[in-house]
Image (cartoon, rainbow, N blue to C red):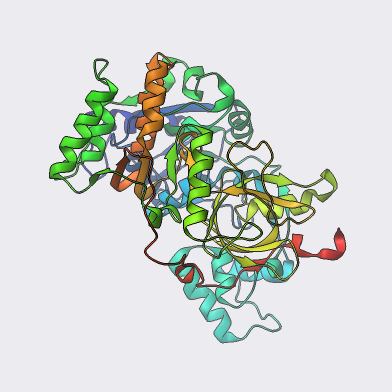
Amino acid sequence: MTLPALTYSEDQAAAHDAVADMLREAGIDLDDGLLLPPRDGKTKIMAITGKAGSGKTLLLAELCKSLQAAGVEVVSGDYEGRRRKDRRTLAVLAPTNKAAFVLRMRGVPATTIHRILYTPVYDPEYERIAEWLMGNGDKPEIEGLTEEALARAQMSYEAHKSIPAALAAAGLRGSDFITGWKRREDPLDIGFVDEASMLDERQVEDLREIFPNLLLFGDPAQLAPVNQSGKMVFDTLAPSQVLNLNRIHRQDADNPILDLAHALADPNLSFDGFERMVEDIARTDDRVVLGQRVEVDLMARSPVLVWRNATRIRLINAFRSVYGAPEDSLLEGEPLICDGIELPLKHRKKRLDLEARGLIKGAQVIYLGPGRKPGFSRLHVIGAEDPQVSAASIVKIEKPNEEEPFIPFAARMGATFLHGAAVTIHKAQGSQWDEVQVFAPDLYAAARMGRSEAGQPLWKRLAYVAITRAQTRLHWVVRARLSKPSGPLQVDDLKAAPAAPLALEVEAEF
């Protein structure tokens, strides 16, 4: 077949051809740009695997471009427009907000799995604007919206292809135009899932119900989901359904972070030998730092990655201590991790509102200050497309050697949060940061214990995942020390737009 202008490696080309064959059987010919109506039948599933740097994301992006060029419509989860029987659709998904954000920064229109499982219900008046923006209707006249507001919406949509962003540019809030959420009833068409090593069996079954054509991208060297005994979704597929990218692509100047990650595949490499390798590289390349202490300035935006829960709790309390955080409140700028939603079943709509805005388990947020009502917080959800929210919050600060966490404040129901200055390496999967600090004493403890997972020393799997979270600089921290902050916590860079209140902030409903 004719490949895109981009030059693929041999294994990428083979994977591209295999996916093209799968799509051709589904009625989409990438060579001729021919689209046939969707066909009924059993779900076809394929996986493309490879270690960090093997070109998985590049291949995903090029396949996405090819499908769009052929006329396949991208479904973002924001708004789908009127359905046509013969339309072909593509959704690019990731398990977390941060993983979807990483893809969007690379030009791939990704959203979270949750935003595809649950779809927004738009107010009919504002739905007319959405249809007009998508080219499916005439320009509407909406009471309260001027021509200038509609022009701003149109400019925003042309730039970002996001209906919520366009309506926000017109001066509307999500609570104005989204009246609720419903679980998707009708299937879609093609699904690309990045960071598929994080998927559990239930998520895969949900995806199979929605997508007749499912393509998974993932790294088999990462850590398996906690509840699956070291197995990943790739392990359940037949060998013919899994394509592995073996060649590692490097930048013009070799990437020392990838060098370290792939060195872990050497079965003879000991922990001491690996640390000597880190030290040697750090002498000549500032992209790798052998840290003698944890840099507290980085912790507000990029958590320290640890293995042991006790280490995580000690680092969090040290972080709060050096910033002078009081026990009974949070400082603006403190990082948090969403630990789930505590709501009874009768408040299902409120749960969907929270989750759809990005407050899903594992989401990283920054505390911006108290909300208008007791127990409410203004939050910036890292990686969410509409990041500013105000929601009922239950914040838990865990203490060393104490079973019960300290709760500085809490609503009666809402989103629960743990502190996010340090996180476990398991929870960091799917995320990337410019600079990452890895707490090496924890990995040394794992090495001394001699534990293994999937036939490999656990410390190597932990190190591989932690190292590959770093995009530009890796800090390998070897001492249990914490630096002093260079100044107070800041939130100015996150206050570009006002926080949008959720339906949950209706006190009378409780």
Could you tell me which residue is drawn at 50 percent across and 20 percent down? Answer: 230
Image location (x, y in percent) of residue 280:
15, 36
Please state which of residues 85 and 237 is positioned toward the viewer in this rendering.
237
Image location (x, y in percent) of residue 349:
77, 52
Q: Is residue 260 above or below residue 6?
A: above
In what quadrant of the picture does the N terminus appear? top left
State left or right for residue 127 relative to residue 442: right
State left or right for residue 32 relative to residue 28: left
Q: Is residue 112 visible?
A: yes
State left or right for residue 55 relative to residue 432: left
Image location (x, y in percent) of residue 116:
60, 46
Could you tell me which residue is drawn at 65 percent across and 83 percent down? Answer: 145
* The image quarter in which residue 124 lies: bottom right
Q: Is residue 507 above or below residue 259?
A: below
* The image quarter in which residue 59 lies: top left
Could you tell me which residue is drawn at 54 percent across and 31 percent down? Answer: 199
Please state which of residues 416 and 60 is positioned toward the viewer in this rendering.
416
Could you tell me which residue is drawn at 55 percent across and 69 percent down? Answer: 133
**Which residue reaches farthest top?**
455
